[in-house]
Amino acid sequence: MLRDFQALKIDVSEEMAQITAEVERLLAIYGSNFSFSSYGSKFLEICQLLQNSGIGQVWSHL
């Protein structure tokens, strides 16, 4: 989904919220694993940035 984010030209803000919540849930479960915590936290930051920027809604209007 993130790879094709701009090309979709639909509002993906709800899907971004679901992905963000799932990554948060997985970090709560597996966050003690250093590797997962590192990659998961970085991915979560990207998800939150995209979600908070409203960019998913903007691209749907292009």
Image (cartoon, grey):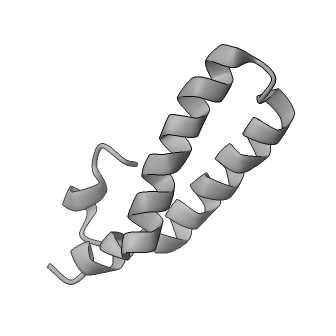
Where is residue 52? Give x, y as percent. 45, 71
- Occupied quadrant, residue 38: top right
Q: Is residue 39 above or below residue 35?
A: below
State the residue at coordinates (58%, 65%).
17
**Depth check, front residue: 24 or 32:** 32
Q: Residue at x 75, y 38 (%)?
A: 26
Q: How many marks?
A: 0
Counting from the top left corner in percent of width and height, residue 34 is at: 69, 17
Q: Is residue 45 above or below residue 10?
A: above
Q: Residue furthest bottom?
A: 61
Is 29 drawn above or below residue 8 in the view shown? above
Rendering coords of residue 49 (x, y %)? 42, 60
The correct choice, above or below, for 2 with respect to 6 in the image is above
In this view, which residue lies farthest toward the right? 29
* Relative side of 51 to 20, left or right: left
Q: Is residue 50 left or right of residue 18?
A: left
Which percent across, then down, holds residue 19? 59, 53
User: Image point 66% across, 45% down: which residue?
Assistant: 23
Q: Quadrant of the C terminus?
A: bottom left
